[in-house]
Image (tube, helix red, strand yellow):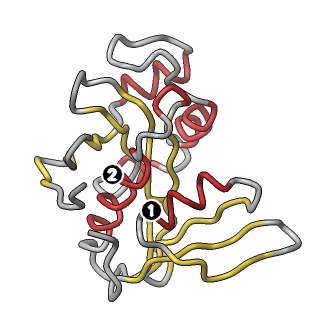
């Protein structure tokens, strides 16, 4: 799989995915429990509800470097979401992602993570992208490793690890 993407307006496109910013209508639909025709049957997941609920408190998360829906290019269904927790803190940004159960195991999460990370490095002053993951979640650890992130810290009290990628060390191609 290629890690190259093209940005059209604010969409990021990979080999199999489109990463498109949330619209206000989609946020409202998630919060109201509505179902939209272009969503996979099991979208939104629990994490999508949580993130949508935080958009009012964090409007920058809906900006150019914010949160996006993960859409299959074949069929156009929304199958997850991914986002950067904007603004950066001393040049670092946190990334989070989730793929609905019905689409897991297709390497969508690493593909989306590579694309959004590469795009994040185009933001002024951003030099590190990181994710915190529970050690009890090996699939998420594999996503980060496949996307080129390396473990930078382990918090045994919280049972979490931080994975990071620096702009000087590009993600896997």
Contact? badges 2 and 1 (CB < 8 Å): yes
Q: Residues within 10 Å of mark 1 (few under 14, many from 20)?
A: many
Image quarter in which the C terminus is found:
bottom left
Residue 14 horizontal/vertical position (percent): 21, 49
- Residue at position x 56%, y 14% in the image: 33
Q: Secondary structure at mark 1?
A: strand
Q: Does residue 139 appear left or right of residue 14 in this picture?
A: right
Pick the residue in front: 75 or 19: 75
Q: For mark 2, what is the residue? A: 63
Q: Does residue 77 appear left or right of residue 142 in this picture?
A: left
- Residue at position x 24%, y 72% in the image: 122
Cα distance between the residues tagged 2 and 1: 8 Å
Residue 32 horizontal/vertical position (percent): 55, 16
Image quarter in which the N terminus is found:
bottom left
| Residue 128 figure quarter | bottom left
Pick the residue in front: 102 or 126: 102
**Rendered position, 45 above or below 144:** above
- Residue at position x 26%, y 41% in the image: 17
Q: Secondary structure at mark 2?
A: loop
- Residue at position x 83%, y 67% in the image: 158
């Amino acid at each position: 799989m290629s890690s190259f993407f093209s940005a059209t307006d604010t969409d990021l496109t990979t080999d199999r995915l489109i990463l498109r910013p949330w619209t206000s209508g989609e946020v409202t639909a998630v919060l109201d429990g509505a179902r939209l025709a272009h969503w996979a049957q099991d979208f939104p997941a629990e994490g999508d509800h949580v993130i949508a609920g935080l958009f009012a408190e964090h409007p920058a998360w809906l900006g150019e470097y914010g949160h996006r829906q993960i859409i299959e290019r074949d069929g156009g269904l929304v199958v997850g979401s991914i986002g950067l927790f904007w603004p950066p803190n001393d040049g670092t940004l946190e990334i989070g992602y989730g793929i609905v159960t019905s689409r897991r195991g297709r390497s969508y999460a690493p593909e989306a993570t590579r694309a959004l990370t590469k795009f994040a490095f185009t933001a002024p002053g951003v030099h590190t992208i990181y994710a915190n993951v529970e050690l009890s979640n090996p699939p998420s650890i594999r996503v980060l490793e496949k996307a080129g992130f390396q473990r930078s810290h382990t918090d045994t009290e919280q049972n979490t690890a931080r994975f990071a990628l620096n702009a000087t060390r590009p993600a896997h191609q």
